[in-house]
Amino acid sequence: MFTWSTSAQAQTLSTSVDASNSWLIYLLPLTLVALLILFVLKKTHWKHPKTLPPELATKPVIAKELKSDEPGISIPAEPADVSEILRDSESSWLGRLRDGLSKTRNQLSGSIGSLFGTKKVFNDELLEELHENLYRSDMGVETADRMVAALRKKFSGQSEMPTWDQVSQSMRDEITAIFGAETKPLNRPASGPMVILVVGVASVAFDGVKAAKARAVDVLLIDTAGRLHSKAELMDELAKIKRVIQKELPEAPHETWLVIDSTNGQNAVQQVKAFGDLVQLSGLIVTKLDGTAKGGVIVGIHNKFHIPIRYIGVGEKAADLKEFQPREYADSLFS
């Protein structure tokens, strides 16, 4: 009896446990399905926010005015006007140009300015000293002659000695006049790539005319191998390079620019002559004006060869290279 009773109880308990386990087996998948549905609904809700009722959608949204004195509130500044940004950039460039020409300016202002502070008479003796100081700034004899002639014409015969401000203003005007009021425009072709041949005493060569035509590029810069202007055989190679270019594009190069180092002073004049005799130069790029007191060499070169100055450099960064503006340059030499 005891044994049967115990067996029956065990059987009943086993049946109860089996029934409980069967509910757990069904409950677990249902719970997972419910969680999955809830997750999908939330994701759908996040991706597709509620749309406003038609009566609210047409109403304008009025933002609360923020006050800068409210705690935790920081009102962003309005974006600067484009013209304001350009003015800042121009001002920054003029500052770098003036700093770059400081050595040349100090020499001119110091040596020439002192003449008009110590001399009492505007005569040939003063003009001779002025000529000597202009020559020292590497403007060259011809340019110094022209500058002195202009000053003699303007100030000779005056009862009073001209001031340094008057003289420096006249020199700025004359330098600007040497370069001309307008810069010669670039020779841009009506179609095909514009080919610019860059020559000088330090560069790296590559030939890309065929690739430029195939890829329909707008401008192709060909930087020729470095060569000294005193090496005849290397200079002759420039003529060969030009012929190679013209096999692909007969009218090229449209521009031929020479890069010169302003620290070379009068040697730069010889470079311009040597390269100009071999290839027709249409522009000059003058670098390192910030590292020399010979910044006046630009004036002498242009006065002698009448080749446009395309760009000038006053440092090593991209922002330190800019299109040449005669008036900016002249003003920076004397103020």
Image (cartoon, grey):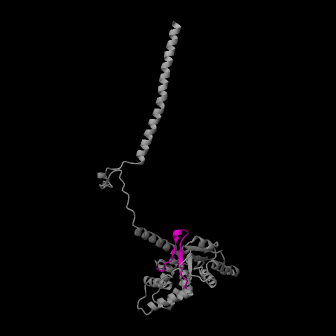
Residue placed farthest to the bottom in the image? Answer: 157
Residues drawn in magenta: 306-327
Nearer to me, 258 or 137: 258
Q: Is residue 244 visible?
A: yes
What residue appears at the point 47 percent right and 73 percent down from the top-left corner? 94
Q: Is residue 47 left or right of residue 261?
A: left
Residue 231 in the image: state x and y as whole percent.
69, 80
Relative height, residue 279 to residue 44 (above, below): below
**Residue 320 painted magenta:** yes
Q: How many marks?
A: 0
Q: Is residue 155 visible?
A: no
**Residue 117 painted magenta:** no
Place residue 169 in its image quadrant.
bottom left
Residue 260 in the image: state x and y as whole percent.
59, 77
Nearer to me, 34 or 166: 34
Residue placed farthest to the top in the image? Answer: 1
Place residue 136 in its image quadrant.
bottom right
What residue appears at the point 53 percent right and 75 percent down from the top-left corner? 312
Residue 255 in the image: state x and y as whole percent.
57, 79
Residue 228 in the image: state x and y as whole percent.
66, 78
Nearer to me, 221 or 95: 221
